[in-house]
């Protein structure tokens, strides 16, 4: 019985280590922007900020600038080969100033399959469902996005992109992004295999004791 308990403990420990390592693994680099914009690609007006609502230290500031472009982008590509689901999390804020009646400034995050056509947008409206309007500034929203995304139809390469579009062209809007994580979600079959292995080891040990 003592040997069975030892085997059970060892297998459960291995399973726990596997699950923790799978959950903590990230498919992108420098998601906290502690190394500036290293690992990321940009276009338009993208810099690194040091203080912002809901931001934890350094963060990416995606801004509108009349001198550069009304559209600013921040993105990183990563490999999703063999994955069915990924978990995407990030902290964000969006501050906008827009006096146009005919168009809205837009902050959007995009997950795109680089080898095919599927695109999944996370718009401001969707992000607002998890956010609380801040009272210290008008037209300023912040929150945390945490979602499971199906990538089973993706071929191999994916892109996570954040974009700010200032449709008015005269007043500024900007977004902050921090603590970006893209992690593979362990498959249920993998967990079942570990469970089956545990049951098999215990059964073998019991037969030996008989």
Image (tube, rainbow, N blue to C red):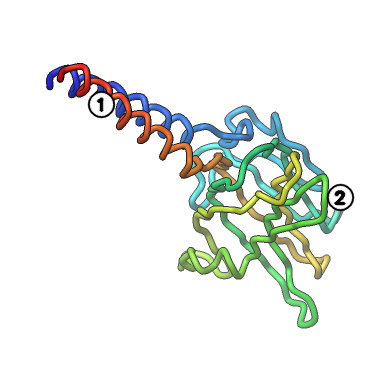
Residue under the point 61% across and 60% down: 94
Residue under the point 77% across and 38% down: 41
Count of marks, rendered view: 2
Do callouts 1 and 2 mark residues in contact (Cβ within 8 Å)? no
Return the residue found at the far bottom. Answer: 101
Characterize the local packing of mark 2: few (<14), some (14-19) or many (20 or more) Cα atoms within 10 angstroms.
Answer: few
Task: Tell me how far mark 1 sits from mark 2, CA to CA.
Answer: 66 Å
Residue 119 vs residue 11: left or right?
right
On the image, the x and y values in percent for residue 38 come to: 69, 29
Residue under the point 54% across and 67% down: 128
The residue carrying mark 1 is: 202
Q: Where is 91 relative to 194, above or below?
A: below
Which numbered circle lies on residue 68? 2
Q: Which comes before the other along the chain, label 1 or label 2?
A: 2
On the image, the x and y values in percent for residue 206 come to: 20, 23
Q: Quadrant of the C terminus?
A: top left
Residue 120 vs residue 208: left or right?
right
Q: Secondary structure beneath disc 2?
A: loop
Closer to the camera, 14 or 21? 14
Residue under the point 63% across and 34% down: 28
Characterize the local packing of mark 1: few (<14), some (14-19) or many (20 or more) Cα atoms within 10 angstroms.
Answer: some
Closer to the camera, 55 or 203? 203
Return the residue found at the far front. Answer: 210
On the image, the x and y values in percent for residue 106 come to: 72, 65
Q: Secondary structure beneath disc 1?
A: helix
Which numbered circle lies on residue 127? none
Q: Quadrant of the N terminus?
A: top left
Q: Quadrant of residue 123?
A: bottom right
Question: Depth-wise, is mark 1 or mark 2 nearer the camera?
Answer: 1
């Amino acid at each position: 019985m003592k040997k069975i308990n030892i085997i059970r403990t060892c297998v459960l420990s291995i399973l726990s280590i596997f699950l923790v390592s799978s959950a903590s693994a990230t498919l992108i680099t420098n998601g906290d922007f502690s190394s500036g914009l290293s690992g990321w690609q940009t276009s338009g007006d993208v810099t690194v900020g040091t203080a912002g609502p809901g931001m934890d230290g350094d963060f990416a500031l995606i801004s509108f600038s009349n001198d550069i472009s009304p559209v600013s982008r921040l993105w990183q590509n990563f490999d999703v080969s063999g994955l069915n689901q990924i978990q995407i999390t990030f902290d964000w804020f969006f501050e906008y100033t827009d006096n146009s009646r005919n168009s809205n400034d837009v902050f959007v995050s995009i997950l795109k399959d680089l080898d095919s056509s599927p695109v999944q947008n996370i718009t401001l409206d969707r992000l607002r469902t998890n956010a609380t309007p801040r009272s210290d500034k008008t037209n300023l929203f912040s929150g945390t996005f945490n979602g499971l995304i199906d990538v089973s139809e993706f071929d191999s390469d994916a892109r996570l992109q954040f974009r700010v579009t200032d449709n008015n062209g005269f007043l500024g809007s900007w977004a902050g992004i921090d603590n970006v994580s893209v992690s593979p979600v362990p498959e249920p079959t993998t967990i079942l295999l570990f469970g089956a292995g545990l049951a098999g080891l215990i059964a073998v040990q019991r037969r030996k004791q008989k």
